[in-house]
Image (cartoon, helix red, strand yellow):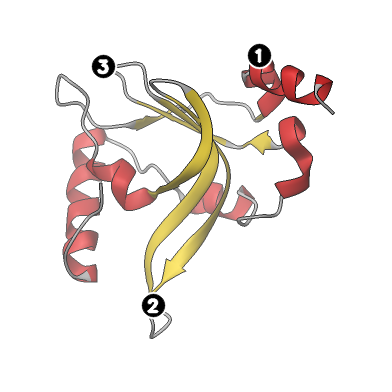
Amino acid sequence: MTTKGTPQRQTDLRAINNKIRGMKLLTQEIRRKLPPLYSQDEKGGNAVAHLKLFTPDSNWTWFLTEGSPVADEAGNEIDFQFFGLIDGQCKELGYVNLSELENVRGPLGLPIERDLYWKPKTLTEIAPEIFNREEQGR
C-alpha cells in the first residue's frame, strides 16, 4: 500500500491522521533515538526494537529497530522508512514506510497507534521462537 500524491498532500494527510489518532507515530524524540537503516544488520536477535506500533482493533504489531528518511531527487524528505519485526499473519522481518502505516485502518476503521509505554527490547526477547532457532542453526 503506497500513498500517492504530492508531498503537500502527504503532509495534509499526516496532520489529519495525527489528529484522529491523537498522537504522532514518529516523534522528533523517537527519530533521534532510532538507529539509521542497516546499522543493526549484524546483530540478528540482539537488534533492539525502539518503537512499537499496533492496530488496536486487530492483531498486527510492528516492532521497529531502525529507520531513515526517504528523500526525493531534490533532497526533500518525502517519507520515512523503517525496518523491524512485523507480527501480522506471521512474524517476519521487513521494511515499511511511515506513509503506509499512517494510512492503514483496522477492521473497525481505527488507525495504527504507538505504544506509549514501550521500553526497548531485543528481537530475541520479543520473538524467541524465531531468534533462538536462528542461533541454534549457526
Say left or right for 41 vs 31.
right
Residue 26 is marked as none
First reached walking from the N terminus: tag 3 or tag 1: 3
Q: Is residue 94 above or below residue 127?
A: below
Instruction: Determine which residue is flagged by label 2.
Output: 76
Between the C-alphas of marks 3 and 2, the distance is: 34 Å
Viewer-side residue, 68 vs 17: 68
Label 3 vs label 1: CA separation?
25 Å
Q: From the viewer's perspective, is residue 131 above or below residue 22?
A: above
User: In the rendering, at what x and y percent does residue 134 appear?
Assistant: 74, 25
Q: Residues within 10 Å of mark 3 (few under 14, many from 20)?
A: some
Single out the mark in the foreground, 2 or 1: 1
Kind of residue indicated by mark 1: Glu
Q: Please tell me which residue is depicted at 49% across the width and 54% down the height of the picture.
A: 28
Amino acid carrying label 2: it is Asn
**On the image, numbered disc 3 is attached to which residue?**
57
What amino acid does circle 3 point to? Answer: Asp
Picture residue at 39% right of the left edge, 51% below the top: 97
**Residue tagged 1:** 129
Secondary structure at numbered mark 1: helix
SS at badge 3: loop
For the residue pair 33 and 40, the one nearer the viewer reads as 40
* Residue 71 location, quadrant: bottom left
Q: Quadrant of the C terminus?
A: top right
